Image (spheres, rainbow, N blue to C red):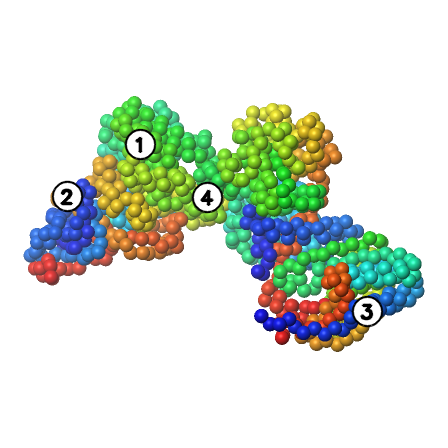
Amino acid sequence: MAAPPKQTTVLDARAFDRTVRRMADEIVELNEGTDDLVIVGIQRRGVQLAAQIVSTIREREKADVARGALDITLYRDDLQTVGPRPVVGQTEIPVDIDGKCVVIVDDVLYTGRTIRAALDELADFGRPRRIALAVLIDRGGRELPIQPDIVGKKISAPASQRVDVLVEEIDGKNGVVIAQREDTV
Amino acid sequence: MTHPLGKDLLGLEPLSGEQIRLILDTAEPFKEISERAIKKVPTLRGATIVNLFFEASTRTRVSFEFAEKRLSADTVNVAASGSSVSKGETLVDTARNLEAMRIDMVVIRHAASGAARFLADRIESNVINAGDGTHEHPTQGLLDMLTLRDHFKRLEGLKVCIVGDVLHSRVARSNIWGLTKMGAQVAVCGPRSLLPSAIDDFGVTVFDRVETALEWADALNVLRLQLERMTAGYIPSLREYNRVFGVSRERLEAAKREVLILHPGPMNRGVEIDSDVADGPFSVILDQVTNGVAVRMAVLYLLSGGRPELAEAAKKGGER
Amino acid sequence: MSNALLLRGGRIIDPTQSLDATGDVLVVDGEIAAIGPRAGNEADGRDGLETLDCSGLVVSPGFVDVHCHLREPGREEVETIATGARAAAAGGFTAVCAMPNTDPVTDNQAAVGFIIRQAQRANAARVYPIGAISVGQKGESLAEFGEMVSAGAVAVSDDGRPVVSAHLMRTALEYARTFGIPVADHCEEPTLAKGGAMNEGIVSARLGLKGVPSEAEEIMAIRDILLARRTGGHVHLCHMSTRGSAELIRWGKERGINVTAEVCPHHLSLTEEAVGDYDTNAKMNPPLRTADDVAAIQEAVRDGTIDLIATDHAPHHYDEKEREFSDAPNGIVGLETALAVNLTWLVAQQRIDLPTLVEKMSCAPARIFKLPGGTLRRGGVADITVFDPDVEWTVDPAAFKSKGRNTPYAGKTLRGRVRWTLVGGRVVHGAAPAPARAGKARG
């Protein structure tokens, strides 16, 4: 059995927290406050990031901001080719998003297809005044004309590498690592 | 494994506990879609689904239709009367015609046991059994289990008693297979003339009286009793059936236990179940209907499409 | 064509002469002229002598099938007397009895005569008509047994259906005594069996198919046995399939009642599990039963409770069987697989030996139905079957001589196959005989 692929740490736990705090500040700045703000995390780890952003905003702005979760599996454009059916996670948009400023939060922005699916799905929930995109890592490699409004860190990673965001709630710690894809080692 | 369920859903007997769990777990997020303002996702956009109903059925067909439309599929209803089928086109020819029209999926309900399997063996499209004779009605079994799981948060060790005409019931069979595979304890209750003579080989407990069943069960699944059973001599009268086996408020109260009440519908109020039970606090009959759409969406989703040879390519470039 | 044929070096099995030894059989002018290790001597010097090399093969009296359905008149697209007779010959049968549930029913002397003539034209296995018990097989009034017998009928039966009325069965048994023919009954109590598509049991419950309980057969079997006792008539019970039936027949025979019984190869080899996923080629009446029933029936063959093996060959058109299980007609073909199925499941599994098999497939049917053949005695008609008891082959319905393809043994590898079938000394199935070297039988 091959040895596990070597990992490079892009953000350690402390850098991760610092980045998330900055992203929360930038979100509030972009919206010019916390009114009508809705933070929607994309399953899976975008949801945890959204939770961390919302709790940071509560700390710093002393305001509670609405939070939702979006699973985009059913809106994917590659369902016909992806083979075994991916498990569908939970979608919960607890407020009416008409006229609101919705900020989509995801862990890694790559081809942009996930965000395209998220935009389609949000459109079925209502018509926000504005939709913005906040991602922890922008790794380039876009296949659609989609750009983030707020970026934690911009890196460049070839297709042969995986960029993995780790969150406390799922992986036991916060961080971002890069590793060689197993089938290209 | 290219598809977790294979090409068709013909019954619960061929499935493993894992596969059943997958369907139930997949149904959960689909429930949420039915709560949205726009009850639609694009997942099966462009797919063509035919509802081939050789037996009249409003509720099952409508439930499937909602499930299909909420997944953005195009649906066509073919009823046994009003098409070439009523002129006596054989099932084989019907199958071949559907295939020639490149239908993606067929939902079939038929009076002959084995009809779904017959169709599935002859066409490439996915086939979903919406009830074949007295053999199986898998989506009903699944939605019954989802309803039970929602309420009790588990199926393992749950005591479920199926009450009524088990002999002629595909719902009963699907429930027996499904619940057994999920680790529940299953019992049946009814007059012996309406239980299969081989029931003791099914691995279920048999109660001769519904009072005894109520002392044991966590939930009762009450089956519809059909008038034909009386005319065919299996029971003397519907009146006596109600007197001896009817699930009534008095019987529930006498049991001094909380027993959940399910019914696949449509109900014969006053025969197998009294109105104050059907509409009472322990009845989850309407939840069954809601869950029915979600379960059917989950099944359609899990069976649909997928070209595995492109899955490899998708995997390589598929990271978001 | 020569009038002398020598079957050389085979294992001759003839239970009527307690014979099981290697030797020769000499056939002259359609009769058995000599049999034994020195039969070849009598062949020496005969002009135009032909030979069949039977070394490694079994030579037995020709098989006789007392129960088959040849579908003509009425369903010639599914089988004719000609194709049926050829299928019979391919299966080693030198004679078959054709059941009367044709369209129109064979219930009068003209209809019986028609079958006799068609059989002569076919010129393969002999075909003896069985006449109906009741007019139109409606179960109401007796058909003219006398007229049918004088036209060539060898028995009466309403097979396809049971004789529902006990009174009619009783009078049929009494009336048949006048003509010395058996009354063959298809035992099925109609109200118990109604709508049933397979054996009632765990498999039918799982598949959601209405089942036929064993009692449907047993109730009529004991009824017929009791009526045979009352009337002194000969009742022949068709296609017995359950343990209960075997026990009842044993009870009847112990009391000296004139009851004979047959079993079909499929009830000796397959169980209800063969239905599998609604395979209509495993659907017949009576249905395949449980493993316990199969064991009991095999034992009944061994101990003589069951007198003979018959095929109940019932061809159906592909389209008819290509239907939902409950709608498909009952019946499977059997003439061309009977020997192999019996060898594979009975003899190879050591339930019975080869001489007993020959007794059940040839001697007993001929004797019980009073037909020529069933023996290799000198002077008897040369109806002979030569078969290889060991060769393995795979069943390919497309290669059948019968028009019917509906068999549950399709694709299965069975053991034993007919090499030659001779009717009246003439090869009706198998390669043509080789001419012997002029003037010499051996060498």
Labels 1 and 4: the sequence-earlier one: 1
Front label number (4 vs 2): 2
Say if labels 2 and 1 share a chain: yes
Q: Is residue A178 visible?
A: yes
Closer-to-camera residue (C312/B48): C312
Q: Is residue A3 above or below residue C127?
A: below
Q: CA distance from mark 2 to mark 3?
A: 106 Å
The residue drawn where x is 53% and y is 27% is B233
Identify residue for label 3. Answer: A14
Q: Which chain is home to disc 4?
A: C
Front label number (3 vs 4): 3
> Amino acid under label 2?
Arg
Question: Within the image, what quadrant is residue C64 found in?
Answer: top left
Say if labels 3 and 4 share a chain: no
Identify residue for label 4. Answer: C328
Identify residue for label 2. Answer: C377
